[in-house]
Image (cartoon, rainbow, N blue to C red):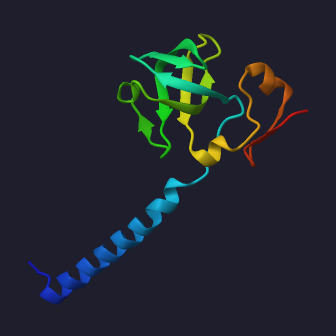
Amino acid sequence: MTRCSDAGRRLALKGVAAAAASLCATLPALAQVARPFPANALRGDIRFGQPPEVELNGQPARLAPGARIRGTDNMIALSGSLMGQGGTVNYTVEPTSGLIFEVWILRREEIARRPWPTTAEEAARWAFDPAAQTWTRR
């Protein structure tokens, strides 16, 4: 059986270290990638209660079974770990049940992106540019 020499092992370790360093250098940039929101996403203020209960814009609401919540880092967050927390979000609603299906907890720069509809009626009257992720009032 052929074995690697010490020099070969050192060279392999240097390669692994270089790859890890380049990956670590790109992680902060990946965290700030613009998140594309669908045209049916509305803006609101949420407060998480005992799952599946939430308060949306001051009114009681429920998360749908299988609801997806994404944190500011765009990673999936569990509703139980968010109990008692809240903030500004974009969200979608299931058309048949009216339950909240997708939630994105927004970062400051996403909150600053205005206007954004808060009701389905506003979204129906406004125009959405999916490439720029902006809404314009007609």
Instruction: Name the residue at 48% across, 31% down.
Output: 69
- Residue 84 visible within the image: yes
Residue 86: % across, % down? 49, 29
Horizontally, residue 126 falls left or right of residue 68, namely right
Q: Nearer the viewer, residue 128 or 85?
A: 85
Q: Is residue 18 above or below residue 62?
A: below
Residue reaching furthest to the right: 138
Q: Name the quadrant of the N terminus.
A: bottom left
Q: Quadrant of residue 116?
A: top right
Residue 71: % across, % down? 48, 39
Horizontally, residue 62 falls left or right of residue 123, namely left
Residue 56: % across, % down? 57, 19
Q: Is residue 3 above or below residue 128?
A: below
Instruction: Name the residue at 41% across, 24% down.
Output: 84
Residue 37: % across, % down? 65, 39
Residue reaching furthest to the left: 1
Q: Name the quadrant of the C terminus.
A: top right
Instruction: Name the residue at 72% across, 33% down.
Output: 39
Q: Is residue 85 above or below residue 55?
A: below
Q: Quadrant of residue 21?
A: bottom left
